[in-house]
Image (cartoon, rainbow, N blue to C red):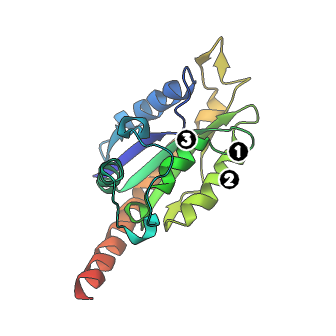
Amino acid sequence: MLNIAIIPGTSRPQALNPQIVAWAKEQLAGREDVRAEVVDFGDFDLPLLDEVIPAGANMYQNDHTKAWGAKLAEFDAFIFVTPEYNHSISGSLKNALDFVASEFNHKVAGIVNYGADKGVRAAEHLRHILANYKLAVVRDQASFSLFTDFADGVFTPTEVSATPFASMADDLVSWGEALKSVREDADSEDQAA
């Protein structure tokens, strides 16, 4: 069974994000090959980045960073549900990602994005950021328009927008299972060193 964290992409009050996060979790609920959990970085009280040593060294000094990192380490895969703000991801998501590093190594991610132009620029920017973590991002993504996938502030995804989620989830499972052996090999090498 693949453990997937669904990570909300914003801490903005009254954002549309919780509706899409809930929808993503519902899409996975019927699958017997995954266990999905919403992991909100807002629950970890992360301030603006306050770690002195860069995250890649994995030498966290602050309890909030240790807790955030430990939670992420529990998962094999991630689904990031991100809005597009000013042609990118939200500042709060970027800040949360900057706290950690190795917890994402040799794992897999999928992206669900939304915005005026379906959030595709945010998704592309997020792909670049996640590549730095040795985090493989599957190709398919669910992209939603503020104009066609919402009605009066309620998430009402169109079939054409929602359909790619299923193939994204299939790829998450395939890649996630394959990458487990890569992590095991990396852990063996670390222990031998």
| Element class at badge 1 | helix
Using the rendered image of the protein, determine whether residue 67 is visible from the camera's viewpoint. Answer: yes
Name the residue beneath numbered marker 2. 124
For this orientation, the residue located farthest to the left is 191
| Element class at badge 2 | helix
- Give the number of the disc on residue 92: 3
Q: Amino acid at mark 3?
A: Ser
Mark pair 1, 2: CA separation: 6 Å
Q: Are marks 1 and 2 in contact (CB under 8 Å)?
A: yes
21 lies left or right of 2: right
Q: Amino acid at mark 1?
A: Val
User: As displayed, is residue 187 above or below residue 129?
Assistant: below
Q: Residue 187, how many percent across, how many down? A: 28, 76
Mark pair 2, 3: CA separation: 17 Å
Q: Residue 119, how many percent across, how many down? A: 69, 39
Q: Earlier in the sequence, mark 2 or mark 3?
A: 3
- Give the number of the disc on residue 120: 1
Q: Amino acid at mark 2?
A: Glu
